[in-house]
Image (spheres, rainbow, N blue to C red):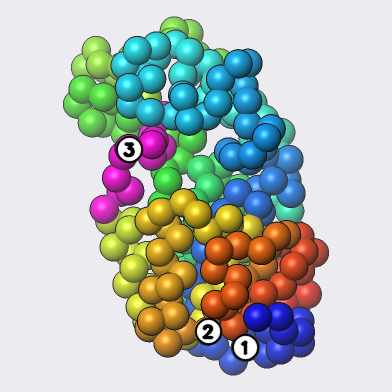
Amino acid sequence: MACTLEQARKWIEEAERIVVLTGAGISAESGVPTFRGTGGLWRQYRPEELATPEAFARDPKLVWEWYLWRRSIIAKAAPNPGHLALVRLEARKPEFLLITQNVDGLHERAGSRRLVKLHGDIWEVRCVQCGRQERDERLELPELPPRCSCGGSLRPAVVWFGEDLPENAWNEAVRAVHSAQLLLVVGTSAVVYPAASLIPMARTSGARIIEVNLEETPYSPAVDCALRGRAGELLPQLIP
């Protein structure tokens, strides 16, 4: 349902235990292309054709070329006022968790620390053979795919279609939502599962839900407050 900024701000100020769920919309305001939609083509490929274990097994060089292209765009992006407002909120609330579906690292660059990355991190790589994971922020690689010290291929440490979410990250997110007094949902289409299931989970647990998004989502009719607009404009007003 609709509500005023003043009402939503009051609920945020009063809540002691807050969880935030962010999606691609907040990153799009920093110039990071969204994963879905009509602009989702890269060369002649859709992300759904490249972000799979099968695509990597078939053509790891092509998959890495796409991810290096994405890295080059993300590297030029900067956190926006929406990201910075969430950092302020974290500093004010002793029981706070930011759950993000984004892999770009903009929340961390903004200063967020109490953070769970449900879909991984584009700046990390994982060996398909030994499972070793490490940070690698290079925009160019000497060979594609890069190799682990064990000789195995390194892949982006992100969650691809058909893969499960990291168990520890998901469990932490669920625990936080179950105990939250307020869930702030920002810039997510609420159609990617299981992340979207955190919204009805919060409702079942008795939390108030505030949604900030440009467009209506499947859960908009069920939230306590639906605010339409850009995260970079609305969040600084909600969290001055």
Q: What's the distance in space between the residues labelled 1 and 3, CA to CA?
A: 37 Å
Q: Are marks 2 and 1 in contact (CB under 8 Å)?
A: yes
Judge by depth and name the residue closer to the eye, 149 or 172. 172
Amino acid residing under circle 1: Trp
Q: First in sequence: mark 1 or mark 3?
A: 1
Choose the circle earlier in sequence order: 2 or 1.
1
Left or right of residue 64, residue 229 in this image: right
Residue 136 included in the magenta stretch of the image: no
- The Cα atoms of the two marked residues, 2 and 3, are separated by 31 Å
Residue at 38% from the left image edge and 36% from the top image edge: 161
Amino acid at circle 3: Gly
Q: Quadrant of residue 187?
A: bottom right
Residue 45 location in percent, x, y? 56, 20
Question: What is the number of the mark on residue 11?
Answer: 1
Above or below — where is 91 with respect to 70? below
Image quadrant in which you'd find residue 180 = bottom left
Residue 37 vs 59, above or below: the answer is: below
Which region shows up in magenta?
Answer: 156-167
Which residue is at 46% across, 19% downward?
Answer: 63
Give the residue number, with chain letter if any, for mark 2.
208
77 or 199, nearer to the observer: 199
> Which residue in the protein does label 3 denote?
162
Mark 2 surroundings: few (<14), some (14-19) or many (≥20) residues within 10 A: many
Q: Quadrant of residue 116?
A: bottom left
